[in-house]
């Protein structure tokens, strides 16, 4: 892999095809934990970690279990089980090994199982049929893109507390409209090319 | 009978999973670009909801407390796989345009939430009915959002032209940004309707 293709891939995963704002994956945590910057940061880190690890694990399951046994129809079941088990494992490992990080991530770790970005990246990788390194790298970069969007959104939402808007927009609606404006900004990145 | 009606109304309005409980945002935003996609997504999720609620409720006394979430997820994933393959066989175009959001029904929070909150505590028939009413609520929300987006971005409903050619299409409504904004406004209208009658807080 050349450094050009690496940069193209990073731009694609983080800006052009941003997981949250363009592909609509991982909206629930995006809206749920973006009220404060520090929790958003914790969630972002946890998602990057789990997405990277999960794409490695699901790649192995796909190559060495589903393909040889010719049971591709078990993909969804197998992937979600692997992800759930992995999240559980990461949780137990962090609890023992890095208690500080475990405390910081708190409730967000178990919640990642139902984050569609994690299953989404595994399915995208298997659809594209990419190799191990590329799959893991793509998952990592997509996680970075998720965190980037989450942090941007969290900083805007902190300011929203002092904004005035109609009562009916209290809570989720105003957050969704804000996310819409942010998504509009990200539309500007579409078609971005550095190495044509 | 009245109980049945109440349960249905609950899913459609008072406890609408998308517009009131705010669950399952990803598929709502991603598949509401056209009414055909929205109807397909809504019905697929409804089928999974009814089946998974039925199965979870039937097995609720056999599933050990500690691993119940994992068991629910496996049950749901099984039905999602079945729906995925049925769509590929009998509605190929729809399955193509919904793409990865079909397998992603597994992580739709509505389904796991109903399994945990309702089906694991209630009888088989009531659980299946709950699946139906929640599924219809989800489908209705999807249809409302997609109707607005499709009319404004293409001037059509279910692919049929309803606005005159002279109407300028608003391209952004088919884009992700339009999805966020339309859903936000729809939820705001829902909140305004529900708040009506409640006393306004003193300014």
Image: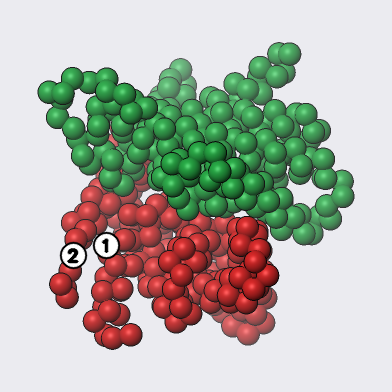
Chain colours: A red, B green
Q: Chain of mark 2?
A: A
User: Number of marks in the image?
Assistant: 2
* Secondary structure at numbered mark 1: helix
Of residues B21 and A104, which is closer to you in this image?
Answer: B21
Q: Are marks 2 and 1 in contact (CB under 8 Å)?
A: yes
* Secondary structure at numbered mark 2: loop
The answer for how far apart the CA atoms under marks 2 and 1 are is 7 Å
Q: Which residue is mark 1?
A: A16
Earlier-in-chain disc, 2 versus 1: 1
Q: Which residue is mark 2?
A: A192
Task: State the quadrant of the N terminus of chain A.
Answer: bottom left
Of residues B135 and A144, which is closer to you in this image?
Answer: B135
Q: Residues within 10 Å of mark 2 (few under 14, many from 20)?
A: few
Tell me the number on the disc at residue B104. none
Q: Chain of mark 1?
A: A
The answer as to whether the residues below labels 2 and 1 share one chain is yes
- Tell me, yes or no, if residue A39 can be seen here: no
Left or right: where A118 falls relative to A94:
left
Q: Position of residue B87 (x, y in %)?
A: 55, 42
Of residues B73 and A152, which is closer to you in this image?
Answer: B73
Q: In the rendered view, would you say B22 is above or below A76? A: above
At horizontal 75% and vertical 37% (from top left) the residue drawn is: B54
Q: In the rendered view, would you say A53 is above or below B129? A: below
């Amino acid at each position: 892999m050349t450094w050009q293709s690496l940069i193209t891939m990073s731009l694609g995963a983080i800006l052009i095809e941003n997981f949250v704002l363009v592909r609509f994956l991982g909206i629930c945590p995006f809206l749920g934990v973006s009220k404060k910057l520090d929790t958003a940061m914790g969630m972002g880190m946890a998602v990057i970690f789990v997405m990277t690890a999960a794409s490695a694990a699901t790649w192995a399951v796909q190559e060495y279990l589903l393909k040889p046994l010719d049971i591709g129809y078990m993909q969804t079941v197998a992937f979600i089980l692997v992800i759930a088990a992995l999240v559980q494992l990461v949780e137990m490992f962090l609890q023992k090994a890095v208690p500080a990080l475990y405390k910081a991530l708190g409730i967000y770790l178990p919640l990642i199982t139902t984050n569609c970005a994690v299953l989404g990246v595994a399915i995208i990788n298997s659809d594209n049929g990419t190799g191990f390194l590329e799959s893991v790298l793509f998952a990592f970069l997509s996680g970075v893109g998720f965190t980037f969007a989450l942090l941007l959104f969290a900083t805007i939402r902190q300011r929203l507390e002092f904004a005035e808007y109609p009562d009916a927009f209290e809570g989720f609606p105003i957050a969704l409209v804000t996310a819409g404006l942010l998504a509009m900004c990200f539309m500007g990145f579409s078609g971005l090319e550095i190495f044509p | 009978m009245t109980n049945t009606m109440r349960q249905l109304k609950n899913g459609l309005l008072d406890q609408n999973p998308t517009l009131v409980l705010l669950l399952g945002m990803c598929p709502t935003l991603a598949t509401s670009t056209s009414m055909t996609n929205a109807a397909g997504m809504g019905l697929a999720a409804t089928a999974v909801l009814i089946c998974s609620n039925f199965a979870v409720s039937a097995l609720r006394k056999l599933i050990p407390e500690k691993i119940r979430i994992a068991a629910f997820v496996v049950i749901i994933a099984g039905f999602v796989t079945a729906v995925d393959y049925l769509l590929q066989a009998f509605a190929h175009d729809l399955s193509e345009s919904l793409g990865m959001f079909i397998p992603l029904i597994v992580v739709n929070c509505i389904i796991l939430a109903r399994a945990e909150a309702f089906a694991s505590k209630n009888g088989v028939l009531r659980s299946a009915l709950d699946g139906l009413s929640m599924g219809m609520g989800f489908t209705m929300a999807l249809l409302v959002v997609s109707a607005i987006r499709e009319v404004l971005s293409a001037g059509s409903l279910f692919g049929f032209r309803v606005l005159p050619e002279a109407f300028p299409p608003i391209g952004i409504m088919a884009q992700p940004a339009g999805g966020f904004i339309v859903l936000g406004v729809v939820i705001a209208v829902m909140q305004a309707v529900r708040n009506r009658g409640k006393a306004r807080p003193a300014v």
